[in-house]
Amino acid sequence: MASVGKIARRSFLIGSAAVAGGVAFGVYAWRKPVDNPLLADLPEGATTLNPYVMIDADGVTLITPRSDVGQGAVSIQTYLLAEELDVDPQTVRTSFGPASGAYYNGKVAAEGMPFAAWNDGLVSRVGRSAAGPAAKFLGLHITGGSTTVPDMYDRLRAAGATARETLKQAAANRYAFVRADLRTEGGAVILPTGDAVPYADLAQEAAALDPIEVAPRAAEGWKWLGKNMRRTDMVAKSTGTFRYGGDLVLDDMIHATVVTNPAMDGGVVSVDDAAARAMRGVEDVVPITDGFAVLADNTWRAMAAARALAIEWDVPTGRPADSDAMWEAHTAAFIDDAQDSRFADDGDVDAAPGDLVTAEYRAPFLHHAPLEPANATVLYTEGGTQVWTATQVPIFVRDAVAAITGQDADLVQVHNQPSGGSFGHRLDYLWVQQAAEIAVQVPGRPVRLTLSREQDMTHGFLRPMAIARGRGTVDDGQVRSLDLSIAAHSVTESQIGRAGLPAVGPDVAIVAAAWDAPYAIPDRRITGYRVPAGVGVSSWRSVGASHNGFFIESLLDELIAEAGADPVAERLRLLHDDASRGVLEAVADMASWNGPLGDGKGRGVAFTIAFGVPCAQIIEVSDTEAGIRLDKLWIAADVGQVLDPVNLESQLSGGALFGLGHAMHAEVTFDNHRIQQTNYHEYESMRLWQTPQVEVRTLETLPTIRGAGEPGLPPAAPALANAIFAATGTRLRDMPFAKSVRFA
Amino acid sequence: MKLTVDGTTHDLDVEPDMPLLWLLRDELRIHGPKYGCGIDACGACTVHLDGLAVRSCQITAQEVEGAEVTTIEGLGTPDAPHPVQQAWIDEQVAQCGYCQSGQVMQAASLLALNPAPTDAEIDAAMSGNLCRCASYPRIRAAIRRAIQSEGA
Amino acid sequence: MRALLILCALAAPAAAQSFDPIAEVLLHPRCANCHVGADGIPLWSTEAGGTQPHGYHMQGGESRMGIETLPCSTCHTNRNGVLEGSAPGAEGWALPPVEMQWAARTPAQICEQLKDPDRNGGRTLAEVADHVGHDPLVLWGWTPGPGLEPAPGTPEETVAAILAWADAGAPCP
């Protein structure tokens, strides 16, 4: 993937007005098109048609500003643009573009607001729509919250359509035709004579015109969207030729690794680096915040030397040091003073009639642990700093690096890289800051920092641990009341705090997918309690829903069992949202829920709405001599509109299996402030042999298009726990389940 | 030391205990094999050593002297993919793709040794390769597709 | 004869003439985790003390050297890995024959096995002791690499204990 700077240097493009996609909100500043950030980096005579399209002598480069962490963001952004611009998505060049507020995410901020996805009332609509402009003004160039497709669907098609029509107008002007008589194909305008004029030949003239805005093409006319498409990275990723950030090679590059205080923060008491310095290939050992970096001519030599550093670490104070104390901090948080939110409070749970059921559930800390260890390459010079790294927050990275180099932010260029997984990990950038700290100590030389797996695993920001206390009543064979209290650290406070921004008000993440579960239970209350900040926590695939789906769907399942009702029928009776009922009916049909079941088998169901996507899952398990075996997983989800059926299935299936693997096996524990799981041998998750057969069905009834990276996860763990209950009679209330049962 | 990688012989001066992975990545700049864990727990570094799948993060320079190593980039190319790579493309296995070099190399080794593995045999041979994105259903499908294409 | 007795007495305390100290070694995770039964699934022991099947669904197979398409040597070389959690190794890395299963067995059962040439590789007890003192894979149990607790004592002490036990008539518990 070519960098913008590199493309710009060999381009001869002319600036022009920009396309602002999305919805207008009646505020002038919001309607005003964003500045085109590509203009800032263009040499004289260079051209760009809008923030998403650049054309030079070699052809078109599409800007796909949403980060690709494996979810296929580059591919779908490319197809959205190519569908309108009529270029070949498999061969067109793409770039992530610069860090810029022009690439603000108009959807992600709305997810942090307490408006249920199924609620389309006036207050919700106004509230959600206010978040878009806020994101624009904040310049939130962020990838996350399953927003890439929802946020880019209109914007990129509009950008592609406008660029296409403007190019056609340029051709019409030059060759004296009417624009309506021209068409486009294969990166060229086709004249009525049949002659093809490449876009590159028309770019300068097109850029001089006022952009011609037209509506994107109707779905009926789509060439690629909505049909099985080949992801644009598939060939390279299958042949080992795809290049990630950690594969970057620059002239005169130094290979580096770091070792920092195993308690995350906390200083150094003493160091003896003589042995490390004496090792072959080691150039230097330099101090960085909370530790040291080893600079060498080979990553392995740097890592070996880092292990040879003899360091005595300071021990932090003022927060719980081990897992037992951390659980205690959570059990102590169920008090009025720590109440964070009570977004749902219907009826009177204290006066609800019927038989009482109570239960407590626990979810552990988890690591994102993407397979590509965190890495960043930084080249610092007095005149400016170049950063190559995979990040979901390029502006935060730019500003954090500028703070270290002491330069203006516009002197720091972030070249975003594709990433070997994230699951939320690359919303943080501690390692980029570390690379910058190293780079300023070796001006003029690029430093490629690669964290060891051990350093990465023991210095991550974690999915919060959480405790839920549930109670409810059943009456006359029905669920009558549900009262769920959840205590957790605030991801928003911790994560936004690291970016230096204040997080005000309650944190929806603490109760996400619980408070807004669309069940018409007469007496219903969901309360969030905020555990005082401890270790840093982070957004982990599906964020709060990753534990709350388990909490509420387990509690509901216990209540339904107590009532003697059918888990699907009772949920259907309670669901008041049509799309939600639709996915539950679909999954019951797929799994033949009411069909016969062999001896020793059990089926469990769960349903959640996360990131606006209703998703229902049924899991079938067998209770075998070797343990619980996951036989089959059925998934039904409604995403409004399907753009890439193959990748959509992969995202839903991947989300569910990722959730199951962690629910079965994974936890992060602490001793003496240190994370105890240092590598994958102590942090097991899903592997091939435990993977059930998976069947996915997608529905398209929602009024808006939705993203699928995260919504497949929350129902998976409770569906498994409920299936194990059905097969064995044992309720699993603590994750990971492997602490209580053996899996075959 | 001498080492043949993807058909090209290299003369190298490295420590005997340098893992093959880092010899490939940082000395020869062959980036197809990936560093994921460094302890044989993920399989992202898998290459073929004299035709057999090994974890290149564990095998060291002294153990590969004079050997023939095949990496994912030598197995096939984007223009002429190996049948297993073609099956991976056709089934659209990859998500982040970081593990897939190792998955493909392990699957190619599996099918070279057992051209018609059962589902259980696929599970047994492939579970040392970790995919954090959990692309496993498509890995299974791609291996079955490769079996059919090889058999056809 | 007298000299030999003295030597044995010097090498091992009187209590070592019982099978107990030998059982302590043989049932230690470094030994028993590979001396598994017919399922051929090696075991792992965690720092917390629990024992579980080898991660990643690994199987010794009929050959006891891994299944044909995933031999142990895919990860295990003839030496230990450098990092905690990495595959340990030694020359001839494989599971012992199935008839030599110790895992999930009692000291009494293992004692009888050890004396039975059909279940000890056709060895006399002196040859068993010699095997313990010289086989690289057995010796690995005392130098298992980073993060793994070695088998108790030393190879020499275990050899002496076996000889002393044999000399005492190889009594079983």
Image (cartoon, coloured by chain):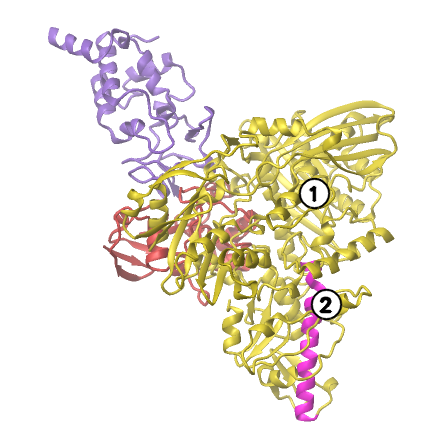
The secondary structure that dominates the magenta segment is: helix
- Locate residue A260: give its quadrant: top left
Q: Earlier in the sequence, mark 2 or mark 1?
A: 2
The colour one sees for chain C in the rendered image is purple
Question: Which quadrant of the view contains residue A738?
Answer: top right
The local secondary structure at tag 1 comes to helix
| Letter of the yellow chain | A
Q: Quadrant of residue C61?
A: top left
Q: Is residue A474 left or right of residue A82?
A: right
Distance (Cα) linking label 2 and label 1: 28 Å
Question: Would residue A169 be counted in the magenta stretch?
Answer: yes
Colour of chain B in the image: red
| Residue holding disc 2 | A21
Q: Which residues are magenta?
A: A149-176
Q: Is residue A275 magenta?
A: no
Left or right: residue A456 compared with residue B61 = right
Establish if A301 lies above or below A407. above
Q: Which residue is mark 1?
A: A509
- Residue A689: image location, x then y, percent: 52, 40
> Which residue, as the protein is rendered here, is positioned at the far front?
A406
Q: Position of residue A589 (x, y in %)?
A: 75, 44
The chain letter for the residue carrying disc 1 is A
Residue B21 visible to the viewer: no
* Vertical position of residue A532 compared to residue A139: above or below: above
Q: How many marks do you count on the picture? A: 2
SS of the residue at dot 2? loop
Quadrant containing the C terminus of chain A in the rendered view: top right
Q: Is residue C37 visible?
A: yes
Q: Residue at x 24, y 20 (%)?
A: C128
Amino acid identity at mark 2: Gly
- Disc number placed over residue A387 in the picture, else none: none
